[in-house]
Amino acid sequence: MIRRKIKIHWTFPCILTVVYAYSIFLASSSDVSVPLPYHTDKLIHFVEFGLLCLMICWSFSFAPIRIKRIYKIVMAIGITSLYGMSDESHQFFTPHRSVDVFDWLADTTGAITAGLLWYIIACKWQTKGKLSAADKISSIPKSG
C-alpha cells in the first residue's frame, strides 16, 4: 500500500482559525438572548474557547516557527485567554449583554484543557512515529 503524506500550507489552518474567532465575535455581538439552564453558558464558553485553542495549536503546528511544542501550546492558551478577555470587554458595549469574569475563567479553563489535550495527543503521535521508524530500521537485514 502506498501512503502519501498530504502537505497543508500553514496559512490554511490560520485562515480557518481566524474565521472561527470571527464567528465567536459575531455571536457575542448579537443582542439576541436565548434562555439557557443555569450555568450552561459556562459550559458553552469552555467548549467554544477550548475549540479555539485547539485550532490555534493546529495552526502553530503548521507554522514555520522554530520553537518547542510546549511553548507553542502556552502561546495558544495565552492567545485564547486574551481573546476571551477581549470578548468579555466587547460585550460591555453590546446591548442586552453583560461582562462576566466567570465566563472569562471558563474560556481560559477550556483553553488550558484543550492545550493539555493537544500536548498529550501530539506526544503520542510523535512517539508512534518514532516507534514505527525504529521498527522499519530494525527489520532491515544486516549484511555481513
Image (cartoon, rainbow, N blue to C red):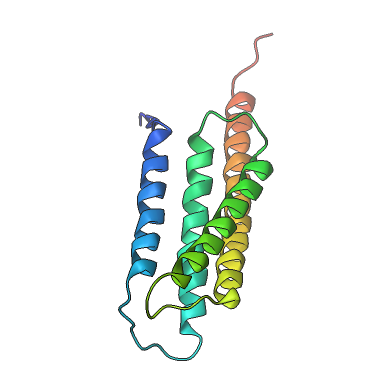
Dividing the image into 4 quarters, which one contains the N terminus? top left
Which residue sits furthest top? 144
Q: As displayed, is residue 44 above or below residue 12?
A: below
- Look at 60% across and 63% down and name the residue there: 113
In the image, is 17 to the left or to the right of 102?
left
In the image, is 67 to the left or to the right of 53?
right
Residue 34 placed where, x, y %? Answer: 33, 84
Front residue of this view, candidates 87 and 59: 87
In which quadrant of the rendered view does residue 107 lie? Answer: bottom right
Residue 123 placed where, x, y %? Answer: 63, 46
In the image, is 119 to the left or to the right of 28?
right
In which quadrant of the rendered view does residue 10 lie? Answer: top left
- Look at 39% across and 87% down and name the residue there: 36
Front residue of this view, candidates 97 and 110: 97
Dividing the image into 4 quarters, which one contains the C terminus? top right
Which residue sits furthest bottom? 38
- What is the number of callouts on the image? 0
- Look at 40% across and 42% down and name the residue there: 13
- Look at 37% across and 29% down and name the residue there: 4
Front residue of this view, candidates 121 and 44: 44
Residue 18 placed where, x, y %? Answer: 40, 48
